[in-house]
Image (cartoon, rainbow, N blue to C red):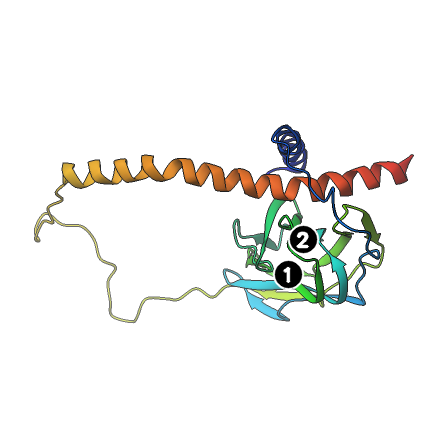
Protein backbone atom coordinates (compact mmCIF):
# COMPACT_ATOMS: atom_id res chain seq x y z
CA UNK A 1 0.00 0.00 0.00
CA UNK A 2 1.28 3.44 -0.83
CA UNK A 3 0.56 6.78 0.80
CA UNK A 4 2.00 10.24 1.14
CA UNK A 5 4.09 10.50 4.35
CA UNK A 6 1.46 12.52 6.25
CA UNK A 7 -1.41 10.26 5.29
CA UNK A 8 0.79 7.21 5.80
CA UNK A 9 1.63 8.26 9.38
CA UNK A 10 -2.04 8.95 10.17
CA UNK A 11 -3.04 5.56 8.82
CA UNK A 12 -0.48 3.69 10.89
CA UNK A 13 -1.34 5.71 14.00
CA UNK A 14 -4.97 4.71 13.57
CA UNK A 15 -3.89 1.12 13.06
CA UNK A 16 -1.89 1.23 16.29
CA UNK A 17 -4.98 2.45 18.14
CA UNK A 18 -6.99 -0.40 16.64
CA UNK A 19 -4.27 -2.80 17.69
CA UNK A 20 -4.53 -1.64 21.29
CA UNK A 21 -8.30 -1.84 21.15
CA UNK A 22 -8.11 -5.48 20.08
CA UNK A 23 -5.97 -6.16 23.14
CA UNK A 24 -2.92 -7.33 21.19
CA UNK A 25 0.27 -6.51 23.06
CA UNK A 26 3.14 -5.98 20.65
CA UNK A 27 6.39 -6.96 22.29
CA UNK A 28 5.00 -6.42 25.79
CA UNK A 29 6.29 -9.73 27.09
CA UNK A 30 9.56 -9.74 25.16
CA UNK A 31 12.66 -10.55 27.24
CA UNK A 32 15.47 -8.04 27.58
CA UNK A 33 17.80 -8.17 24.60
CA UNK A 34 20.85 -6.30 23.37
CA UNK A 35 20.26 -3.25 21.20
CA UNK A 36 19.86 -4.20 17.54
CA UNK A 37 22.88 -3.48 15.38
CA UNK A 38 24.35 -3.99 11.92
CA UNK A 39 27.99 -4.14 10.86
CA UNK A 40 27.53 -2.54 7.44
CA UNK A 41 24.88 -1.16 5.10
CA UNK A 42 25.10 -1.11 1.29
CA UNK A 43 22.86 0.08 -1.53
CA UNK A 44 23.35 -1.67 -4.87
CA UNK A 45 21.99 -0.69 -8.28
CA UNK A 46 23.05 -1.20 -11.91
CA UNK A 47 25.65 1.23 -13.23
CA UNK A 48 23.79 1.92 -16.48
CA UNK A 49 20.26 1.54 -17.84
CA UNK A 50 18.21 2.96 -20.73
CA UNK A 51 15.21 5.24 -20.40
CA UNK A 52 12.12 3.06 -20.23
CA UNK A 53 13.93 0.16 -18.54
CA UNK A 54 12.99 -1.24 -15.14
CA UNK A 55 15.71 -2.23 -12.67
CA UNK A 56 16.19 -3.29 -9.05
CA UNK A 57 17.79 -1.44 -6.16
CA UNK A 58 18.73 -3.55 -3.13
CA UNK A 59 19.49 -2.35 0.40
CA UNK A 60 21.54 -4.89 2.38
CA UNK A 61 22.29 -4.92 6.11
CA UNK A 62 25.15 -7.26 6.98
CA UNK A 63 26.21 -8.48 10.41
CA UNK A 64 22.74 -7.75 11.84
CA UNK A 65 21.82 -8.79 15.38
CA UNK A 66 18.45 -8.71 17.20
CA UNK A 67 16.58 -6.82 14.46
CA UNK A 68 12.83 -7.31 14.92
CA UNK A 69 11.89 -4.49 12.56
CA UNK A 70 13.21 -1.42 10.81
CA UNK A 71 12.29 1.75 8.96
CA UNK A 72 14.43 2.79 5.99
CA UNK A 73 14.09 5.88 3.80
CA UNK A 74 15.67 5.67 0.34
CA UNK A 75 16.13 8.90 -1.66
CA UNK A 76 16.71 9.43 -5.40
CA UNK A 77 16.20 11.99 -8.19
CA UNK A 78 12.49 11.82 -9.15
CA UNK A 79 13.18 13.55 -12.47
CA UNK A 80 15.31 10.58 -13.57
CA UNK A 81 13.66 7.49 -12.06
CA UNK A 82 10.33 6.49 -10.51
CA UNK A 83 9.47 3.82 -7.93
CA UNK A 84 7.25 0.98 -9.20
CA UNK A 85 4.30 0.72 -6.82
CA UNK A 86 3.93 -2.61 -5.06
CA UNK A 87 7.38 -3.87 -6.05
CA UNK A 88 8.98 -4.14 -2.58
CA UNK A 89 10.45 -7.57 -1.80
CA UNK A 90 11.33 -8.13 1.88
CA UNK A 91 12.43 -10.95 4.18
CA UNK A 92 9.84 -13.72 4.49
CA UNK A 93 8.03 -14.07 7.81
CA UNK A 94 7.07 -10.44 8.32
CA UNK A 95 4.88 -7.59 7.12
CA UNK A 96 5.89 -4.40 5.35
CA UNK A 97 4.28 -1.09 4.45
CA UNK A 98 5.62 1.41 1.93
CA UNK A 99 5.08 5.17 1.90
CA UNK A 100 6.12 7.25 -1.09
CA UNK A 101 6.80 10.95 -1.63
CA UNK A 102 8.58 12.85 -4.39
CA UNK A 103 12.09 11.41 -4.45
CA UNK A 104 11.77 9.04 -1.47
CA UNK A 105 10.48 5.58 -0.58
CA UNK A 106 9.85 4.95 3.13
CA UNK A 107 9.71 1.23 3.94
CA UNK A 108 8.66 -0.16 7.33
CA UNK A 109 9.20 -3.85 8.07
CA UNK A 110 8.34 -5.87 11.17
CA UNK A 111 8.45 -9.50 12.24
CA UNK A 112 5.24 -11.11 13.49
CA UNK A 113 4.18 -11.84 17.08
CA UNK A 114 6.59 -14.30 18.64
CA UNK A 115 8.74 -14.67 15.51
CA UNK A 116 12.46 -14.48 16.33
CA UNK A 117 14.43 -11.34 15.58
CA UNK A 118 16.63 -11.38 12.49
CA UNK A 119 20.39 -11.78 12.53
CA UNK A 120 23.02 -12.10 9.84
CA UNK A 121 22.17 -10.55 6.46
CA UNK A 122 18.90 -8.67 5.91
CA UNK A 123 17.90 -7.10 2.62
CA UNK A 124 15.01 -5.62 0.72
CA UNK A 125 14.61 -4.80 -2.96
CA UNK A 126 12.66 -2.07 -4.74
CA UNK A 127 11.99 -1.82 -8.46
CA UNK A 128 12.37 1.47 -10.35
CA UNK A 129 11.70 2.65 -13.89
CA UNK A 130 14.13 4.96 -15.72
CA UNK A 131 12.16 8.01 -16.87
CA UNK A 132 14.68 10.25 -18.59
CA UNK A 133 18.35 10.49 -19.56
CA UNK A 134 20.66 11.60 -16.76
CA UNK A 135 22.08 10.03 -13.62
CA UNK A 136 21.04 9.50 -10.02
CA UNK A 137 22.42 7.81 -6.95
CA UNK A 138 20.25 6.04 -4.38
CA UNK A 139 20.89 7.27 -0.84
CA UNK A 140 19.70 5.53 2.32
CA UNK A 141 18.74 8.77 4.02
CA UNK A 142 17.84 7.19 7.37
CA UNK A 143 17.69 3.77 8.99
CA UNK A 144 16.16 2.90 12.37
CA UNK A 145 16.30 -0.59 13.90
CA UNK A 146 13.73 -1.94 16.37
CA UNK A 147 14.30 -4.81 18.82
CA UNK A 148 11.65 -7.29 20.09
CA UNK A 149 10.85 -4.97 23.02
CA UNK A 150 10.14 -2.06 20.58
CA UNK A 151 13.29 -0.15 21.59
CA UNK A 152 14.57 1.93 18.67
CA UNK A 153 18.19 2.32 17.59
CA UNK A 154 18.73 4.98 14.90
CA UNK A 155 21.80 4.65 12.67
CA UNK A 156 23.48 7.78 11.39
CA UNK A 157 25.81 6.31 8.77
CA UNK A 158 23.94 6.63 5.47
CA UNK A 159 24.78 4.38 2.54
CA UNK A 160 24.88 5.56 -1.07
CA UNK A 161 24.88 3.54 -4.28
CA UNK A 162 27.16 4.35 -7.20
CA UNK A 163 25.46 6.70 -9.67
CA UNK A 164 23.13 5.03 -12.15
CA UNK A 165 23.58 6.45 -15.66
CA UNK A 166 20.39 6.54 -17.73
CA UNK A 167 20.88 6.65 -21.51
CA UNK A 168 18.21 8.07 -23.82
CA UNK A 169 15.73 5.51 -25.08
CA UNK A 170 16.08 4.44 -28.70
CA UNK A 171 13.30 4.95 -31.24
CA UNK A 172 12.80 2.05 -33.64
CA UNK A 173 11.93 3.11 -37.20
CA UNK A 174 9.60 0.92 -39.29
CA UNK A 175 11.37 -1.31 -41.87
CA UNK A 176 11.97 0.29 -45.26
CA UNK A 177 9.19 -0.23 -47.78
CA UNK A 178 6.48 -0.76 -45.19
CA UNK A 179 3.46 1.41 -44.62
CA UNK A 180 1.85 1.86 -41.20
CA UNK A 181 -1.42 -0.05 -41.01
CA UNK A 182 -4.57 2.03 -41.31
CA UNK A 183 -8.19 1.17 -40.78
CA UNK A 184 -10.43 0.38 -43.74
CA UNK A 185 -14.02 -0.48 -44.38
CA UNK A 186 -13.10 -3.95 -45.62
CA UNK A 187 -11.72 -6.80 -43.64
CA UNK A 188 -13.18 -9.31 -41.28
CA UNK A 189 -14.96 -8.08 -38.22
CA UNK A 190 -14.35 -9.62 -34.83
CA UNK A 191 -17.44 -10.16 -32.79
CA UNK A 192 -17.38 -9.76 -29.02
CA UNK A 193 -19.77 -11.78 -26.94
CA UNK A 194 -20.54 -11.56 -23.27
CA UNK A 195 -21.49 -14.34 -20.93
CA UNK A 196 -23.80 -13.17 -18.20
CA UNK A 197 -23.40 -16.39 -16.26
CA UNK A 198 -19.60 -16.06 -16.15
CA UNK A 199 -19.84 -12.43 -15.07
CA UNK A 200 -22.22 -13.40 -12.27
CA UNK A 201 -19.86 -16.16 -11.13
CA UNK A 202 -16.92 -13.76 -11.04
CA UNK A 203 -18.90 -11.17 -9.11
CA UNK A 204 -19.94 -13.80 -6.59
CA UNK A 205 -16.36 -15.00 -6.18
CA UNK A 206 -15.15 -11.43 -5.64
CA UNK A 207 -17.70 -10.82 -2.91
CA UNK A 208 -16.66 -14.06 -1.15
CA UNK A 209 -12.95 -13.21 -1.21
CA UNK A 210 -13.27 -9.52 -0.30
CA UNK A 211 -13.51 -10.00 3.52
CA UNK A 212 -10.29 -12.01 3.49
CA UNK A 213 -8.52 -9.39 1.38
CA UNK A 214 -9.62 -6.65 3.79
CA UNK A 215 -8.55 -8.69 6.81
CA UNK A 216 -5.14 -9.39 5.26
CA UNK A 217 -4.62 -5.71 4.49
CA UNK A 218 -5.51 -4.77 8.07
CA UNK A 219 -2.94 -7.23 9.43
CA UNK A 220 -0.26 -5.69 7.21
CA UNK A 221 -0.99 -2.21 8.56
CA UNK A 222 -1.24 -3.37 12.19
CA UNK A 223 2.01 -5.28 11.99
CA UNK A 224 3.97 -2.28 10.68
CA UNK A 225 2.23 0.22 12.96
CA UNK A 226 4.08 -0.69 16.15
CA UNK A 227 7.49 -0.41 14.46
CA UNK A 228 6.72 2.94 12.86
CA UNK A 229 5.17 4.44 16.00
CA UNK A 230 8.20 3.36 18.05
CA UNK A 231 10.57 4.97 15.52
CA UNK A 232 8.59 8.21 15.33
CA UNK A 233 8.39 8.49 19.15
CA UNK A 234 12.16 8.03 19.39
CA UNK A 235 12.73 10.77 16.82
CA UNK A 236 10.33 13.11 18.62
CA UNK A 237 12.16 12.52 21.90
CA UNK A 238 15.54 13.29 20.33
CA UNK A 239 14.20 16.51 18.83
CA UNK A 240 13.17 17.94 22.24
> Disc count in the image?
2
Quadrant of the image occupied by residue 172 = bottom left
Q: Residue furthest right?
A: 240
Residue 223: image x %, image y %? 62, 43
Which residue is under mark 1? Answer: 134
Q: Is residue 204 at all visible to an observer of this figure?
A: yes
Q: What residue is shown at x 67% (from left), y 58% (from top)?
A: 116
Front residue (pair 88, 179): 88
Q: Is residue 168 at all visible to an observer of this figure?
A: no
Front residue (pair 185, 234): 234
Front residue (pair 84, 172): 84
Answer with mark 1 or mark 2, whichever residue precedes in sequence: 2
Residue 53: image x %, image y %? 51, 63
Q: What residue is shown at x 80% (from left), y 47% (from top)?
A: 151
Q: Nearer the viewer, mark 1 or mark 2?
A: 2
Name the element at disc 2: loop
Query: Are dots 1 and 2 in contact, CB under 8 Å?
Result: yes
Which residue is under mark 2? Answer: 77
Amino acid sequence: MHHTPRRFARLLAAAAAALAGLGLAVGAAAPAVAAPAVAAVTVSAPSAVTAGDSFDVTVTLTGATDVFGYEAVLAFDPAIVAYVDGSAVVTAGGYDAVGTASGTVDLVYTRLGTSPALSGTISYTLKFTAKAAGSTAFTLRSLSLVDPASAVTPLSNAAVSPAVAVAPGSVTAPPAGTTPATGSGSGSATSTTSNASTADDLASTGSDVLPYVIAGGLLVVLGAAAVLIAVRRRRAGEAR
